[in-house]
Image (cartoon, helix red, strand yellow):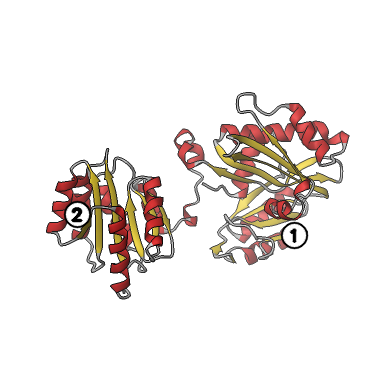
Amino acid sequence: MKLQEHQSKRIFARYGVPVPEGGVATTPQEAREIAARLGKPVVVKAQVLVGGRGKAGGIKLAETPEEGGAIAAQILGMDVRGLPVRSVLVEEAADIASEIYLGVVVDRAARRPVMMASSEGGIEIEEVARRTPERIIKVPVDPFLGLRDYQVREMAYGIGLEYDLMPGFVKVARGLYTAFVECDASLAEINPLVVTGDGALLAVDAKVLLDDNALFRHPDLAGMRDLHEDTPAEREARSYDISYVQLDGTIGCMVNGAGLAMATMDLTKLYGGAPANFLDIGGGAKADTVAAALRLILSDKNVKAVLFNIFGGITRCDEVARGILAALEGVETDVPMIARLVGTNEQEGRRLLAEAKMITAVTLEEAAQKAVAAASACGGRT
C-alpha cells in the first residue's frame, strides 16, 4: 500500500524527522489560505501515487498566497501519468544548499532491512545505482539490534556529510528507521533530505510503502488508503480478500494459492497463451468468494477463456464448483471455461461442472492447453 507524500511526512514527523510546515488543499481557495497562514513563499505539489510529478508540471513555487491559489488551480485536475490530481500539498519553500538521499528498504536476499544514503539526493535511487553506484552507501541492519549510531556515522562519512550536521543526521536516520519498523513498511525514503542555507536538515519529500499483510495491526494506516488510485475491480477484490492483479492477456485465471497461480500463468504462457490476470482466491475460499472472483475475471472484456486451477486442501473442490455455478447464474457469458480440480471432493466437483457443460481437465498441462485452444477459437467480446 502506497502513501501520499503528505501522509508519509505526517508519519515521519511523529518520529522526530523535521518536515516543512504546510497543509493539504483540494481547492484553490484552500491552497490560498494555507499559503497565507504560512506567510512565506510556498511550493505547491500534486498529490498522486506516481513519480514524475515535477516533469509533468505538478510541482511549482509560489511567492504569494494569490499565486499559490492560481498554481493550485492549474495543478488540480491535471493528469500525471494517467492519474488525475485531486489534492495538492502546500508547504513552505526550503532554502536548499545541498540534497541527500536517505532510505530504508527490505533486502529479501539478506533477510534484513538495509539503510541507504547518497549524496545524489533529488535523483531516483535507481538512476544513481545505474550511473554512479559507488555513491550509494548501504548499511545492513540487524533486526534484533536495530540501527546503531556508528552505522549512521558510517553512512554520513561515506557521503561526505559535514561534521556539524552529524547529530541532526543521526536523529533523522534513527527516526526514519523506527518509523519503517513500527509501521511495518517495506520502503521508507526521504528524497531529498536537504541541507538548508542555515545548516539544518529538512525532509522535503517522503515516500512510504506499507506491507499489506501487516495492515491488520495498523487500522489507522489502513484508513489512509487512497481508494481513487484503485480500479473498481481492485476495490471489489479487496472487499473479498482476493489477491488480484489485472494483466493484458486473454485467459482469465482463478487459482487458490500464489505459487500455484504463478505456475498456472507460466503454463498458460508456455503453450502459447497470455494470462489476463493474477488471481488468488486463498486457501479457504467459499462459494461467495469464488463467485466474486469470477465476476472480476469476466468484467475484463479482453478475457476469451477462463481457466480454473484448484487444489482442494482447505478449499473443497465441490465448494468451488458450486461457487462457479452460482456466479454463472448471475452472469450472462459465452466465454468458454476450463476447470482443473484436484484434491478434496474432486470427483464431485468435476461432476457438477461436467453436468453444466464445462470443459474439465485432470492435469495442469491439459487444462492450460485446452484454455489456450479455447481462447484462440473464441472471437472478441462486446
SS for tag 2?
A: helix
Residue 138 to residue 289: above or below:
above
Q: Relative to residue 165, is residue 215 drawn left or right?
A: left
Q: Relative to residue 38, is residue 165 drawn left or right?
A: right
Q: Which residue is mark 1?
A: 62
Nearer to us: label 1 or label 2? 2
Residue 200 to residue 335: above or below:
above
Quick one: which residue is furthest to the top in this view? 145
Q: Relative to residue 322, is residue 76 drawn left or right?
A: right
| Whole-percent x, y for residue 350 in the image | 17, 52
Badge 2 crowding class, 10 Å Cα cut-off, few under 14, some 14 to 19, many 20 or more, is: some
SS for tag 1?
A: strand
Identity of the residue drawn at 84% across and 39% down: 161
Q: CA distance from mark 1 to mark 2?
A: 58 Å
- For badge 2, the amino acid type reads Ala
Decide which of 97, 292 is in the foreground and name it.
Answer: 292
Identity of the residue drawn at 58% across and 66% down: 79
Q: Which residue is mark 2?
A: 326
Q: Relative to residue 180, is residue 330 drawn left or right?
A: left
Identity of the residue drawn at 81% across and 44% down: 195
